[in-house]
Image: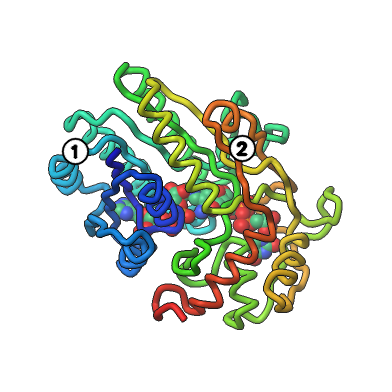
Amino acid sequence: MLVFLAGGAGYIGSHTAVELQNSGHDIVIADNYSNSSPEVIKRISELTHRDVAAYEADVCDKAAMLRIMTAHRIDCVMHFAGLKAVGESVKKPLAYYRNNIDATLTLLECMQKCDIHSIVFSSSATVYGEENPYPYVETMPRGRCSNPYGWTKSMMEQILEDAARADPRLSVVLLRYFNPIGAHQSGLLGEDPQGVPNNLMPYVAQVAVGRRDHLTIFGHDYPTPDGTCRRDYIHVMDLAAGHVRAVEYAAEHKGTAVFNLGTGMPYSVLDIVTAFERNSGVRVRYEFGPRREGDLPEFWADADKARKILGWSASRNLDDMCRDSWNWQKRNPAGYKTGCL
Ligand code: NAD
Ligand code: UD1
C-alpha cells in the first residue's frame, strides 16, 4: 500500500515510516518541519535503503495537499501533523485549535476530492480525560480534558467519527497512544524536542548527556506505590508496528475503530530514573519538586482490544526503551542539528 504520512518527519511519524517500508509498504511524507528537520528524511532513507518522497508543505494548505494526493496513488493517510506541547497549548489555545483542527479538516476534504477512503489518526490517552477509572478501555466515553491540546484531540476524534458516519466508504482508525519513549535501535532516529523538554524521557536523557543539570520530579506524595506518578510507557518502535497493523486493518474495514496503543503496564517516574541509570550506566541527578498542574496520579491502557483485533501487542520492555533512548541521545547529543556520532 502507498501510505501518505502527514507530519511524517516527526518523532512517531519517522519511526513509523521505517516500519512501514520494512513491512513492504511505500510512503510519501509531507511536513512543514515546524517541529522536525529535513535531516530526518535522509536518515529514514539511510535506514531503509530507499528513496523517500518528501514534501515540505503545510498540511493546512489545501492546494499543496491536493497536489500531493493527485501526484501519488495514495491508499491511506496517516495523520501525525499537530502541535503537541500541553503547556504551550494553554498559553496559545487559538494556535492549537487552528493548526490541529484545520489540518484534520483539510486532509479529510482533500481525501474526499481524491477518492482516498482510509485514515489512521494519532490520538492520545489524554481524551479519556480526568474522570475515567484506569485502566482505560476504548468503550469508555471521552472525558473532560485539562488543556486545549487535549481538547483538540477529543474534537478531532469527533470530526473523524462524524465524517465516517456520513460517508460509508470511509475507514477511520483512531489510535490512542499512551506514553511513547525509546528510539530506533540504530540510534539514527529519536525524539528531538526543541527547547526545554516537556516530557519525562527526553528530559532524563538530556540530564544524562549533560545538557541539563538535573531532573525535577513533579510530586512525590501521590497515592501510588512510591509516591510518584505512574504511566504506561511504550517503545516507539512497538507503536510504529501498531500503525502498520492499523493501516492493514483500515484497508479491510469501514467506519470508525478505536484502539489503545499501550503496554498495559504502569511504571513510576522513579522506576524510569532507575531503569535509565541501569541501562546507561550514567547517574541521573534529580530533585523532588511540586506537582505539575493537570497531572493525573496514574493511568494505563487496557491493551486487549489491539491484541485481539489487530493481533498487535508491545514486545519491548522498559530496559529496551531506556537503552534505545540513551543510545539515541548519546549518539546525537544535540539532536538532529549535528551529525550522528
Ligand atoms: P512531533 O512534533 O515530533 O511530530 C509532528 C510533526 O508534524 C512534526 O514533524 C511537525 O513539524 C509536523 N507538523 C505540525 N503541524 C504541521 C502542519 N500544519 N503541517 C505540516 N506538518 C506539521 O510529534 P510526535 O511525538 O511525533 O507526535 C505525532 C502525533 O502524535 C501528534 O499529533 C501528537 O499530538 C500525537 N501524540 C503524541 C504523543 C507523544 O507523546 N509523542 C502522545 C499522544 C499523541
Ligand atoms: C503528557 C501530556 C499528555 C500528552 C503526553 C504526550 C500533560 C499533563 N499531559 O503526558 O496530554 O498526551 O504528554 O505528549 O502534560 N515528569 C516529571 N518531570 C519532568 C517531566 C515529567 O516528573 O520534567 C513526570 C510527570 O509529572 C508525569 C510523568 O513524568 O508524571 C510523565 O510525564 P510526561 O512525559 O510529560 O507525560 P504525561 O504527563 O503522561
Q: Residue placed at 77% from the left, 66% from the top?
A: 274
Q: Is residue 283 above or below residue 62?
A: below
Task: Say what amino acid the circle numbered 2 marks.
Answer: Gly
* Neighbours of disc 2 within 10 Å: few (<14), some (14-19), many (20+): some
**Where is mark 1, residue-wise?**
73
Label 1 secondary element: loop
Q: Position of residue 1 (x, y in %)?
A: 30, 38
Task: Say what amino acid the circle numbered 1 marks.
Answer: Arg
Label 2 secondary element: loop
Q: Is residue 77 above or below residue 292?
A: above
Q: Residue placed at 61% from the left, 71% from the top?
A: 205
Residue 129 bears which disc, if any?
2
| 182 relative position to 288: left or right | left
Q: Is mark 1 within 8 Å of ligand 1?
A: no
Q: Is mark 2 within 8 Å of ligand 2?
A: no
Q: How many marks?
A: 2
Query: Which label lies toward us, 1 or 2?
Result: 1
Q: Position of residue 162 (x, y in %)?
A: 38, 23
Q: Is residue 309 visible?
A: yes
| 328 relative position to 273: left or right | left
Q: Residue placed at 58% from the left, 57% from the top?
A: 181
Q: Residue placed at 69% from the left, 60% from the top?
A: 319
* Neighbours of disc 1 within 10 Å: few (<14), some (14-19), many (20+): some
Q: Is residue 96 visible?
A: no
